[in-house]
Amino acid sequence: MLLNNKGIILIFAETIEFENLQFFNHAEIKFSFNDFKTVFDSFKRNSENRLSIIQGIRRENVSEMILENITDFHSKDFLLNIKSIENLSINEILKISGTVFERSIDYYKKAAEMLERHADLSKVLTEIADSHTHDYNHMVHLN
């Protein structure tokens, strides 16, 4: 799908955050009896907060969702195929977590760039990328 306007970019951001939320929720449940529960709970809560921010922005801007001339920005570049984590080790789940964060960081940075003429929105998207970077750095220190 071509991400060619503000509305579609925000809808896809919601999709990303919902996928992240589901992944971290499953990871938290899988490791609910060890020290990783707290880490994945934190990642899950951060995903919930980011999802809420994106949904709020989309609601606020619903009347402004006009078509824009954004090209070369496609959802296929940000799709992940995350299999069930039930049989994965903590190291495998941490590796996938890194991929989840890297995808999110990349998406929000590119979305902010694509929407730079909407300064307020671009700033929020950059802040969300920074939030993912913070979680990613926390996750890297677990290895």
Image (cartoon, rainbow, N blue to C red):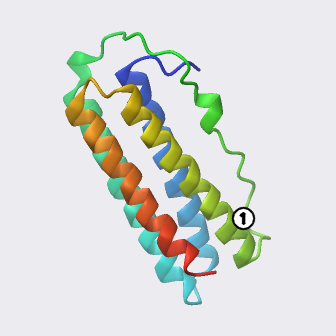
- Image location of residue 90, percent across then percent down: 70, 77
- Image location of residue 123, percent across then percent down: 26, 41
Residue ID at (63%, 33%)? 77
Q: Quadrant of residue 29?
A: bottom right
The number of numbered discs placed on residues in the rendered structure image is 1
Depth order, front residue of 8/77: 77
Residue ID at (67%, 61%)? 96
Badge 1: how crowded within 10 Å, few (<14), some, or many (20+)? some
The quarter of the picture where the N terminus appears is: top right
Kindly identify which residue carries mark 1: 85
Residue ID at (35%, 23%)? 6
Residue type for callout 1: Ile
Q: Is residue 89 above or below residue 19?
A: below
Farthest residue in the bottom direction? 34
In the visual, does 22 lie left or right of 113?
right
- Image location of residue 87, percent across then percent down: 80, 70
The quarter of the picture where the C terminus appears is: bottom right
Farthest residue in the right direction? 87
- Image location of residue 89, percent across then percent down: 76, 76
Residue ID at (74%, 59%)? 84
Depth order, front residue of 75/31: 75
Q: Is residue 98 above or below residue 114?
A: below
Q: Is residue 2 above or below residue 94?
A: above
* Secondary structure of residue under mark 1: loop
